[in-house]
Image: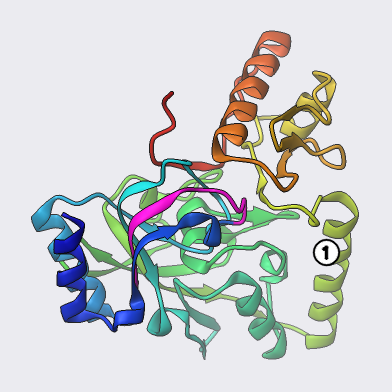
Amino acid sequence: MSRALEEFFGTILPKDHVLMEEPMDRHTTFRVGGPAECLVTVDTRQQLARTLSYLQMTGWDFFILGNGSNLLVSDKGYRGVIIRLGKEFEQITVCRGGLRAGAGAMLSQTAQEAMREGLDGFAFAAGIPGTVGGAVRMNAGAYGGEMAQVVKNVEVMAMDGEILTLDNATMEFGYRTSAIKSRPYVVLEVELALTGGSSEEIAKRMQELAQKRREKQPLEYPSAGSTFKRPEGMFAGKLIMDAGLSGKSCGGAQISEKHCGFIINKGTATAADIARLIAETTKTVQDRFGVTLEPEVIFLGDFSG
């Protein structure tokens, strides 16, 4: 079966864009995960459309990979196709009233471009280690800002290759969610509505937020950022700390003592260690406070046994 994948992608993609049995610890910020059966990089919309059509026809499972910053891949790997969006999807251009950013563009680079152009409103995203596409899908946010506040419209591709444009209201943004989570669309490009501002003031704000991150977050260790969504009216990190779980470990995975909302890889963690620590943390907080923590992390692959 893998041979059929390799042969098909060999007809539409450069050889170095097709990786078989690719270790996913190279592609996630947790730095864990077994091999993906096939990981491909598509550089154009035409390549993406042909890829989606083939996968639909053959029934292969697939996953669209951003920066892997919110992803936990099983130690057993992923029996399917991982699709990474390359060159055409990494472009950032200035448009009237803001920026247009490809789904594969890093948030940090997009924020830097906005700052250079004197466009305000995106400084909150400068330190989020993800891509624009992933951020739109989950309505990523930090320090009082979120994608819903700045997205004007989103260009997406349906599984049949049709390209649609969804406006802000159609995106149905909510806390760490959007319409993309429940619809079979792949984000292509996002138009951001930003306001005019001073590049110097924007840069200063970005520096202030970066300093806050360094002071409060365990950036020296691999992690997926905040492991859990914020329960309404509460903070996941405080609940975890109040449950006495600061520093709790499972194998090489640990609840950060610096910020209890983060589960970190101390260097030897497996995906199973991280998954077990998430499960034990969830159970303890539920037992102690009657609050159900919901992971922000996406689990990909088989975590049974």
User: Circle 1 sits on which residue?
Assistant: 209
Q: Is residue 23 magenta?
A: no
Horizontal side of residue 281 vs 158, given as left or right: right
Horizontal side of residue 72 vs 251, given as left or right: left
Secondary structure of the residue carrying tag 1 is helix
Label 1 crowding class (10 Å Cα cut-off): few <14, some 14-19, many 20+? some
In percent of width and height, residue 1 lies at 15, 54
First to last magenta residue range = 29-41
Residue in the image at 53% along x and 67% along y? 131
In percent of width and height, residue 249 lies at 75, 29
Residue 123, compared with residue 114, is above or below; it is: above
Residue in the image at 39% along x and 72% along y? 85
Q: Is residue 36 magenta?
A: yes
Which image quadrant for residue 114? bottom right
Considering depth in this image, is 264 or 261 the residue closer to the camera? Answer: 264
Residue in the image at 67% along x and 9% along y? 287
Tell me if residue 1 can be seen: yes
Horizontal side of residue 136 vs 51, given as left or right: right
Q: Residue furthest left?
A: 57
Residue 282, compared with residue 81, is above or below; it is: above
Considering depth in this image, is 78 or 256 the residue closer to the camera? Answer: 78
Considering depth in this image, is 214 or 253 the residue closer to the camera? Answer: 253
